[in-house]
Amino acid sequence: MTTNTQIKLARRPVGEPQGSDFEISTATVPEPGEGQVLIKVLYLSLDPAMRGWMNEGKSYVPPVQIGEVMRALGAGRVVASRHPDFAVGDHVTGTTGVQEYAVLDGSELTKVDPSVAPLPTFLHVLGMTGMTAYFGLLEVGQPKAGETVVVSGAAGAVGTVVGQIAKLKGCRVVGIAGGKEKCDFLTGELGFDAAVDYKRGDLKAALRAACPEGVDVFFDNVGGDILDTVLTRLRMHARIVICGAISQYNNTTPVKGPSNYLSLLVNRARMQGMVVFDYADRYAEAAREMAGWMREGRLKHREHIVEGLETFPERLLMLFRGENFGKLVLKVADD
């Protein structure tokens, strides 16, 4: 009988996750029950949100429990099915967890076509990452042509898509990223109007130079000092989308809130959090539009592929150290 290698949460991390916070174990590959599907996991999405899922406490999803397989979105191939809508050989995405094989109800799966795009793309632009960028910007940020949109974590999975959609909507786009290579990629490859390297010098001065008339929409993936700095550049009736705060996820002290929040009052601005699951009934709509932009060459994507299920703990840390370029995806097996 084939065994199933799994990565389980062994203890709740304090600060940056360590390898000892996880346990590698094996189990017998399960059989699907009625209405279920057995999937061979091929790729896993590595996301900053995973750090929050490890914490005890109330959030938008329940925490991963100690001893459970670490939660993750995955893409894979059906190897056994007891669901009429899924056949052996179909490719699907769903919350597979960090393991080689997963059994899920058919209702928890989305069938995808690898002839349309490579499987990792369904964990990026055509998956939750793309949905987050699309609805976070268009529904919460509500950009208008001619406005200035600033994106933090701009060279990451969500940020690259947000900036390109903002350009498609006729906005001036400024990305905040770490390092010259990432900033050059934003302006040279993705068409951002400007990029600010937060690792170089005075962020406030650089942002002022890049946004001389201020900021209309700020899509924030980082939080902390970057959020606080952008607050000083808001225009009247600006909108701030709180998508994430990766700079704060490994804190061992309380989360650093914005000290410049009164700028919201002065500028009659709005700051709103967004969780992609709120738009689940509209995913197909967003996927169709973004797939069209991709076919037209107007929406580019970049996946950073790393390999090896057992490398999950160290690969996850790449997100918090700014080592990924585009969407970070872990390859588990060949198709």
Image (cartoon, grey):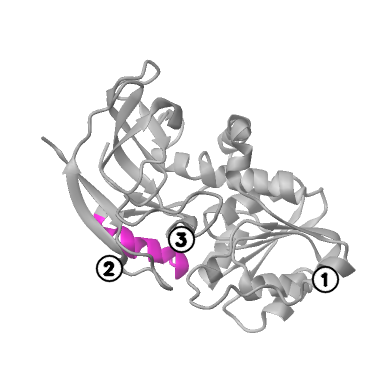
Secondary structure beneath disc 3? loop
- In the drawing, what numbered circle is on residue 263? 1
**In the image, residue 168 above or below residue 264:** above
Q: Position of residue 59 (x, y in %)?
A: 55, 54
Mark 1 vs mark 3, CA separation in Å: 33 Å
Mark 1 vs 3, N-terminal side: 3
Q: Residue at x 14, y 37 (%)?
A: 2
Q: Position of residue 271 (x, y in %)?
A: 75, 59
**Looking at numbered disc 1 in the image, what kind of residue is underneath it?**
Ser
Quadrant assignment for the N terminus: top left
**Above or below 28: residue 214:** below
Q: Which mark is residue 20?
A: 2
Closest to the camera, between mark 1 and mark 3, is 3
Position of 280 with respect to 140 (left or right) is: left
Which sits in the foreground, 65 or 282? 65
Residue bearing mark 3: 56
Q: CA distance from mark 3 to mark 2?
A: 18 Å
Which region is colored magenta? 310-325
